Image (spheres, grey):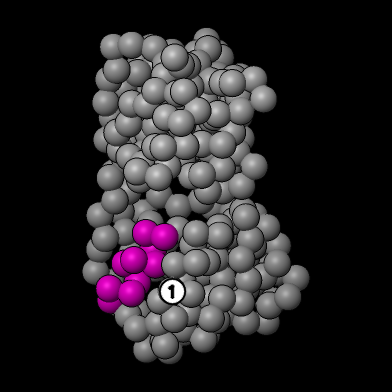
Amino acid sequence: MPTVLSTKKLKLNQKSLLLNAGISLVEYDAINIDLVSFEAPKSIENAIFTSQNAIKSFVGNVHSSAVENAFCVGEKTKSLLEQNGFKVNKMSEYASELADFIVENHKNESFHFFCGNIRKDEIPSKLRENGIELKEIEVYKTKLNPKKFQRTFDAILIFSPSGVRSYCEANLQGNAAGNHIYSTMMICIGKSTANEAKKYTENVVIANTTTIESVITKTVKSLNGF
């Protein structure tokens, strides 16, 4: 029976998708998230969210009615926004796609980006390059949680660039990035995560969509030869 390592603790129904496919699971949280207090305007015309963690922190500090329009990355992020009463103007699978949409359709507007301390640069750089006013507000912190494993796995499931760094910091010490000497398959939730993984291995697979379930589905297909 193949065994995989998930760098994020999975829900019971997500674990079942692997176990029912004959795949054994080891799991841990490669990163820890700390929500932080922050100040935000009472009225926000356009708010950008690229993670569910940012939404959780926001709703704990500010009422959703403060936001006129929400822009987000990922289906799960959109779903959580709508559950909390936000009006979602646009959802994209990737941050780069959302940045392009904003530049093309909202060039004369201003935005607030609610993000973590380790955030991707696609949105801030693209908007500022095109003269769009953007204020970043840090609402959570990502901390690496390195853990050494004294064994090999058939695949590593990874859900963020930070997750790649955390896993590799503990398990690939001495393996210089770019040498591609790590052979275990890394199954990644999106392009940014895959780009980080490619610093360590050429054996990188990207899920079809940016959801945990899609990573699991890709894992099952990759290991079972579908």
Q: Which residue is the extreme one toward the right?
A: 104
Location of residue 64 by image quarter: bottom left
- Within 10 Å of disc 1 (Cα), the crowding (few <14, some 14-19, many 20+) is few
Residue on which disc 1 sits: 83
Circle 1: residue type: Gln
* Residue 97 locus on image (x, y percent): 68, 57
Judge from the rendering whether residue 21 lies leftward or rightward of residue 92; answer left or right.
left
Q: Secondary structure at mark 1?
A: helix
- Image quadrant for the N terminus? top left
Of residue 96 and residue 25, the one placed in the foreground of this image is 25
Residues shaded magenta: 52-61
Q: How many marks?
A: 1
Judge from the rendering whether residue 183 lies leftward or rightward of residue 33; answer left or right.
right
- Image quadrant for the C terminus? top right
Judge from the rendering whether residue 180 lies leftward or rightward of residue 164; answer left or right.
right
Q: Residue at x 53, y 81 (%)?
A: 87
**36 is higher (above) or lower (below) than 188:** below
